[in-house]
Amino acid sequence: MKTRVEARGVQVRRATEADIDVLAEHRVALRIDEHGLAVELREAARDSTAVTYAELIATGEFQAWIGERDGVVAGSVCAWLRRMLPIEDGSRPLDARVQAMYILPAHRRSGVGTLLMSALLDVMRELGVRRVHLHPSEAGRRFYPAFGFVPSEEMELILASRESL
């Protein structure tokens, strides 16, 4: 996907290794805002996330996009790709999990999130991704259906403490 310049001064581009710190900061901000991560853990969480993102981007398992408005970072979205076990025809389909869709507060409800998600889904289709999963925030429950996301029938069992998630 090439850089896309869109209306209202928004540009969406593929993230590079140079963006890892921004992506890590956005993930940590989301965890503080949505999941109650203690602010004093911010630096350690950001540093460990940056290391992990660098490893995953290098393998191609992790793809990310940055949204900028008038040259300033306004948000980001990431997808973690995984090859599934073989299905009946022997192929191993590719699935993706959206990680850390984060729009800075000053840019929310301005179209940045829509452009980021559209870019992500365009590339997922190009890659032949079979399914895209995500765990929405409360705001996301209203946002994602416009892209065709529906509640799934998955269940989860959390074996770790909530704070470690």
Image: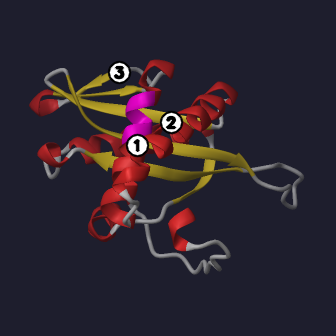
Name which quarter of the figure residue 141 lies in. bottom left
Q: Which residue is mark 1?
A: 77
Q: Classify the position of the N terminus by image quarter.
A: top left
Name which quarter of the figure residue 153 lies in. bottom right
Query: What is the x, y in percent for residue 57?
Result: 60, 30
Q: What residue is drawn where x is 86% and y is 55%?
A: 86
* Mark 3 or 2, closer to the camera: 2
Does residue 65 lie above or below 136 as drawn?
above
Q: Are marks 1 and 2 in contact (CB under 8 Å)?
A: no
Q: What residue is drawn where x is 87% and y is 61%?
A: 88
* Most common SS among magenta residues: helix
Residue bounds of the magenta highlight: 21-25
Q: Which residue is mark 2?
A: 47
Secondary element under disc 1, as helix, strand or loop, is strand
Q: Which residue is mark 3?
A: 3
Q: Is residue 106 magenta?
A: no
Q: Classify the position of the C terminus by image quarter.
A: bottom right
The three-letter code of the residue at mark 2 reads Asp
The three-letter code of the residue at mark 3 reads Thr
The three-letter code of the residue at mark 1 reads Val
